[in-house]
Image (spheres, grey):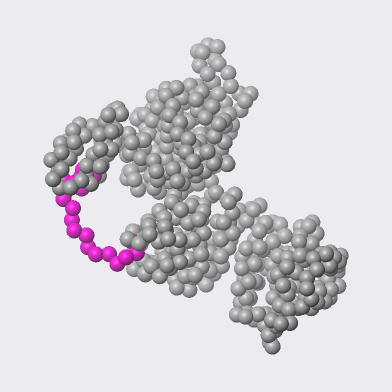
Amino acid sequence: MPAIDLARLRKQASRLVDFFFLPDEFMKHLREMLEFYVNRTLRTKENVAPGSNLKTYRTPPAVLTQIENELRMTAEANPEFALDLADMLWDEGSLETCLLAAFLLGRIPPQEERLLPRLTLWTQQVRDPDVRYALLSTSLTRMRKESPSQFLALVREYLHPARMRSWSNGLQALLPMIADANYENLPPIFDMVEPIIEEAPSTVQNDLTELIIALYRASANETIFLLKHILQNTENPMTAITLRRMSSGFPPPLEKELRGLLRPQQPAAPKPMEMDNLADEIFVTEDVESIDATLKKKDVRKTKPESAGTEKKTLSRKKKGTKMDNSKIIYLHGLESSSQSGKARQFAEKFPGMLTPDFTGTFEERMAQLLPILGDKKDWTIIGSSYGGLMGTVFTCEHPDQVRKLILLAPALLRDPSGEHSDPATGEYLIYLKGSGYRLQTVSVPAIVVHGTEDDVVPLEPVRETAQKLFTNLTYHVVNDGHRLHKAFDELDWEIILA
């Protein structure tokens, strides 16, 4: 193989693209170029790629990368010709031409009806791991970015319970989307992979390991919660066994979190009844001294047996409080989230009986779905995340007498600058929030906002300004976290916040 001269390589690749609209000439010059860069020191006698049924030129990756770079713009501008050329490259049947064919599929608009049939057929035909990976990642590039709902529908087909042979394709296809730092809507992915993880067949063990590691890197807290939820609720005895085998490949913090659930369990000795009952009770506190007492109570429980008398005295004092009614707590999820999101499920686990409904459609449609749930009942504690924070704010400002407390997590309180003024009749400050269709007035309902300095979805300062104008009784917590508040969620004491 001659040394790669980058200037010459660029010229050769550019010359090749001149034949883009002449497929036969393109293939002829491509073969000449691949032959020119053959690495004969590595070429096997059979000229077949290891673990594959495809012949190979043993061309250095830099050559294919340069060809792809030169092809990109022309292929995207001429998808019809790109699809025809991809067919010819695939039929050529070498490792290099199949990789180029997969690359061209990734330049085709997702609306092209012939895209998915080719992708489905080619993934069934190929054995080579590099080509398979390219088909499930590079070939789906535009669909992932331009039509994520269509992409997720395709993955759901791959992960259908009756199609176990295609599960590996579905898991591999998800990896680039999970790794995309700009993609935030992980709940639908968690929903899709949960039954696959629970089934955990050995045939996809390696793919599952890759998937779990990718999910952990994207959202550690939600991944830990999902795996613990599966291990605690599964009726399949093989789930823990398979995950135990896989756990050696997990990041150490994840392996440590799951260790107790993956270890063969021994029957636990029953705890004293009095302590169990006390531990399960949550009491509303009236002031800071009561909150301090609550925190001290938790510390006392961990002391030695001789302090039991002091503990009982402290706890008996706490019993004068009023037990929190979880049925009056509601969580409103974000725009593209659901009742199965990580936050919703964690809240439901922490506070059994609280409401975590699903909302769909426009803002007005979502508010129409919310109103019958809240009805005319009072003393609601509303937790709203992102778009759900906008919903909770609108309801609270319009029905302040029904809301006991409002907790907003990175709320989408972005106002229209032209839509704010003081009402001359009442003197109330009115504000118009984008997307809500409502003008809101200032309220005195206790409001707590948790917002991250690294939030790249809902800007912190404009939201803080809006919240300060809407709520006269406002606590604003700025945390070092992103829009989804993964780190902050576990660090906050939700019993105290909701009390």
Which quadrant, please, contains the N terminus? bottom right
State the residue at coordinates (39%, 24%).
401
Q: Position of residue 411 (x, y in %)?
A: 50, 36
Q: From this viewpoint, is residue 477 visible?
A: yes
State the residue at coordinates (16%, 46%).
274
Q: Position of residue 15 (x, y in %)?
A: 86, 66
Which residue appears farthest toward the bottom when viewing the image? 45
When the figure is inspected, residue 25 is found, relative to residue 433, above or below; the finding is below
Q: For this view, does 203 lie left or right of residue 496?
A: right
Q: Is residue 345 magenta?
A: no
Please tell me which residue lies in front, 10 or 97: 10
Which residue appears farthest toward the top when viewing the image? 425
Which quadrant, please, contains the C terminus? top left
Please tell me which residue lies in front, 339 or 311: 311
Q: Position of residue 394 (x, y in %)?
A: 49, 30
Q: From this viewpoint, is residue 78 visible?
A: no
When the figure is inspected, residue 255 is found, relative to residue 317, above or below; the finding is below
Q: Which residues are magenta?
A: 261-279
When the figure is inspected, residue 100 is found, relative to residue 486, above or below; the finding is below
State the residue at coordinates (59%, 54%).
180
Q: For this view, does 18 lie left or right of residue 428?
A: right
Please tell me which residue lies in front, 468 or 325: 468
Q: For this view, does 120 lie left or right of residue 438?
A: right
Q: Position of residue 95 (x, y in %)?
A: 69, 75
Q: How many numbered markers are drawn?
A: 0
Please tell me which residue lies in front, 138 or 487: 487
